[in-house]
Amino acid sequence: MPRSDDAVIKVRDLAVDFAGRHVLKGVNLDLKRGEILGFVGASGAGKSVLTRTIIGLLPMQAGTIEVLGVELSKASAAERQAVDRRWGVLFQQGALFSSLTSGKNVEFPIREYLRLSPKLTTEIAISKLEMVGLKPDVYRNFPSELSGGMIKRVALARALALDPEILFLDEPTSGLDPISAAEFDHLLLTLQETLGISVFMVTHDLDSLHRTCDRIAVLSEGKIVEAGNMEVMLASQHPWLKEYFHGERAHTDFQVAIKGRRVTEKRA
Amino acid sequence: MTAASLLSVQVNSGGLDLAASGSWTAEHARALEPQIEHASRVDPSVRRIVVDVTQVERLDTYGAWLIERTLRVWSSRGVEAELVGLSGRYNNLFKKVRAGQQKLTPEKHKRTGIVATLESVGRTMTAVGSDLFTIFQIAGALLVAFLSIVAHPRRFRFTSLINHLERVCWNAVPIIILITFLIGAIIAQQGIFHFRTFGADIYVVDMVGVLVLRELGVLIVCIMIAGRSGSAYTAELGSMKMREEIDALRTMGFDPVEVLVLPRILALIIAVPVLAFIGAMAALYGGGLVSWLYGGIDPKIFLSRLHESITIKTFAVGMIKAPFMALIIGLVACMEGLQVKGSAESLGAKTTDSVVKSIFLVIVIDGLFAVFFAAIGV
């Protein structure tokens, strides 16, 4: 996959107030084309606030956000909608429409935006469901009939419905068992390779960070304190990062594994 | 890029050459679909088909699927179908799309016509039966919870009861007074208007008194409460069910009926008689006011006439129905709430059911009471 250095998302000096306090105070962040960016930070550090601000669910107080060359705060409604079509969002709980079947959930954006024949719409939806590793019959199940992991997959299929260029993932592996989480990571890498999408992933899963991410950005006290690959993270002297990557939960075989082997392993 | 230049079709000696070019992506999928379907029908006698994608600049799942679908259509007719010129970067994408089976088990056959109607009637009847069963079930659970509270009064959630009383009783007073006042006024106005032709306007007082105290006061209040508080109960319990809060209570060793249902229904049983009394008074006041201003019946005459026409029995007959109706509203509301399934739609459906069923049952109970009181001669 040829990888150019242009950024699909550029966040500059972003400040956001939420629930009466300054959550983000001058965030600068780039998401480069074709990369998987892991986004970490302590619970309550404002990861979700940043994600929700970029996708336009929260208002910002200062700064600029540029997505695919469009500055969102200055974009007209039509430009804004054009951008909405080019990204997909996977919410933490899936956020599937509970009154629609899985298939209709995936078809929803296709139906609204592309106006294809019903036959092709259904075929594309089934194709997307199969792409994320589900059986075609899941098409007829309602979200309440699915397990947590399946809901996440259906939600991913819906996020991928329009073949987006950018994918936002909010803790995609939380609530999944380690095997499902590993499958998810694998799926993400395959999708990155087949579709060439750029991924912005909020996660707490160290294994997932290790397996999938090209770059990691760390949010602490309202700012990005560190950004770079895993080696940069491990070498960082920031106290929270030291605790995060060298603490009790960062098991030793994982630390051994990341030294030098990561790049080869990832593409294998 | 115009859609027309995306696909060119050539027929040559028993073979079909399809040459794709440009962007085979989601935004062109609408134009591509008829073109490629047309190409599949152009000449059914061909023995061999080649799809050339060398000139394709951009490809996504939509384009890949359209090409794959064409190949599958031809292969299923026994024609040799071949894809050439796929660039390396789209190899994986194609493999991923090709891996899809697209096999959906056929949907269960749906009945139509008279059989479907009969089936739906049958299903409704069994649903009524199972509703009846559930309502007895929850009434039983409520009784058990009530008895265990009587045995251990300390376990009773008094704060919860007060909280619900505030919401279903105190906060409902203004709207109940307004509605019943208007109902009383309207009955009096209509009565005077029609009775006047017989010179019997004074009997309006009897009519307002008996109607309001015996029937309408409590009925109007119950319908209001079913819409106002019954629906709220169903929605609360339903969303708690959806978010597994009720399961959480159960695992901690609490009985959801005791913790959630009992205080709510007790609050209703206290609230409805109180509101029915307030409502009856407001309706009498409204009736009296209209009789005076519109019918020229002096308040003193109204009161003395009222004194003659109604007895404490009339009042008691109305009030005695109130707690039973409250119990029915509460039971239906909680039963529907606890039956909510995972979806937002089911919460809405159950809330509607709750209001419709409790109003229906309130009227049925009112009818049963009327028969009962007639039988004992009150």
Image (cartoon, coloured by chain):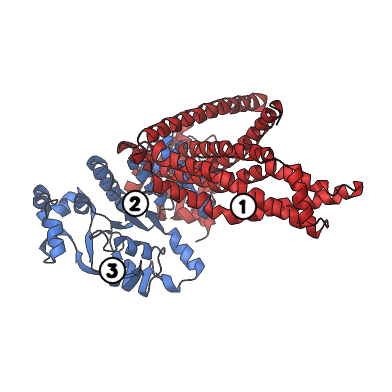
Chain colours: A blue, B red
Describe the element under mark 1 as helix, strand or loop.
Answer: helix
Camera-side mark, 3 or 2: 2
Using the image, determine if residue A222 lies above or below residue A250.
below
Question: Residue B156's x, y, as percent?
Answer: 38, 41
Residue count near mark 2 (Cα–Cα under 10 Å), binned few <14, some 14–19, many ≥20 = some
Which is more foreground, mark 1 or mark 3?
1
Mark 3 lies on a secondary structure that is strand
Residue at label 2?
A92
Q: Name the amino acid, label 3.
A: Leu
Left or right: residue B11 versus residue B279 is left
Question: Could you say which is closer to the camera, residue A150 or residue A88?
Answer: A150
The subunit letter for the residue under badge 2 reads A
Residue B370 x, y percent position in the rendering = 69, 32
Going by the numbered disc 1, the residue's amino acid type is Ile
User: Dot 1 corresponds to which residue?
Assistant: B176
Tell me which chain the residue with mark 3 is part of: A
Q: Which residue is mark 3?
A: A29
Q: Which three-letter amino acid code belongs to the residue tagged 2?
A: Gln
Label 1 to label 3, Cα distance in Å? 58 Å
Query: Is residue B61 visible in this depiction of the protein?
Result: yes
Separation (CA) of disc 3 from disc 2: 22 Å
